[in-house]
Amino acid sequence: LAKTTQPISMDSYEGQEVNITCSHNNIATNDYITWYQQFPSQGPRFIIQGYKTKVTNEVASLFIPADRKSSTLSLPRVSLSDTAVYYCLAQANQAGTALIFGKGTTLSVSS
Amino acid sequence: DTAVSQTPKYLVTQMGNDKSIKCEQNLGHDTMYWYKQDSKKFLKIMFSYNNKELIINETVPNRFSPKSPDKAHLNLHINSLELGDSAVYFCASSQEASGRDEQYFGPGTRLTVT
């Protein structure tokens, strides 16, 4: 079972900032938070990863509070092409562990 | 250059047949994976190989047999195909075998069993 919980779907308009929150109440000490994006008919694509505090790259920001029981993926100024499924994963930093994907959040961006 | 490639992209076959899906990665990664995404879009790990050795083998019918001839290739052979095997199969690779390591996914193979 996935160790994370996230909203099933979200709607937004072009140009808005989108924040997707993920709950991981039972996160382990050696777990990292990783987000993947999947477009229709494509494989998932890595977006961002963090352990605590804030991580930012050219695509998104990831906010993880001190207790690490939740995290928020922030997508600045979304466009229609950001319509996709976003998966939040809590993955252990150890060999032989598989990615466990939950249901993900389907983000729909409209004009 | 395609990082992770799969062939074929589409595969339509009848129940009872045997089929194979091939995967190749040109990233120089040590670890490769097979995932299955069903009609409800759940993505589940099936197998993982690290340096040609099986390290993850989830609860998958033994009709499914992965084969890794070298680090760059991981093929999936399926015997006696059933209707429930219809799904999209994704191959992926990562530099190391840690769950934290970024995985690169192929474009998927859509298998339809009739």
Image: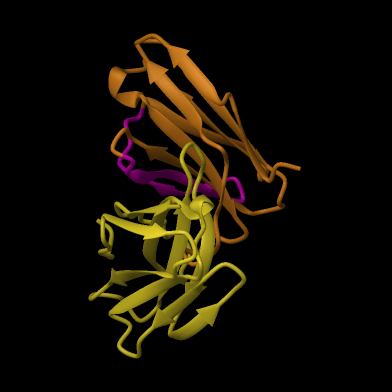
Residue visible at 25% across and 64% down in the picture:
A5
Residue visible at 55% across and 56% down in the picture:
B103
Q: Quadrant of the C terminus of chain B?
A: top left
Quarter of the image for residue B6 reads top right
Total numbered badges shown on the rendered structure: 0
Which chain has been coloured yellow in this picture? A
Q: Position of residue A48 (x, y in %)?
A: 52, 68
Query: Would residue A53 be seen by someone viewing this image from the given angle?
Result: yes
Which chain has been coloured orange in this picture? B
Q: Position of residue B23 (x, y in %)?
A: 60, 35
Query: Would residue B18 be seen by someone viewing this image from the given angle?
Result: no
Q: Position of residue A70 (x, y in %)?
A: 30, 77
Rendered position, A15 above or below A71 = above
Residue visible at 38% across and 38% down in the picture:
B37
Please identify the residue farthest to the front as the structure is shown.
A111
Rendered position, A63 above or below A13 = below
Judge from the rendering whether residue B90 lies leftward or rightward of residue B80; answer left or right.
right
Please identify the residue farthest to the right as the structure is shown.
B1
Q: Nearer the viewer, residue B70 or A38?
A: A38
Q: Nearer the viewer, residue A22 or A13?
A: A13
Q: Nearer the viewer, residue A61 or A91?
A: A61
Q: Quadrant of the N terminus of chain B?
A: top right
Judge from the rendering whether residue A101 lies leftward or rightward of residue B6; answer left or right.
left
Q: Is residue A30 part of the magenta span, yes or no? A: no
Span colored in magenta: B41-62
Q: Nearer the viewer, residue A10 or A15?
A: A15
Q: Position of residue B101 (x, y in %)?
A: 54, 64
Residue visible at 43% across and 85% down in the picture:
A52
Q: Is residue B48 part of the magenta span, yes or no? A: yes
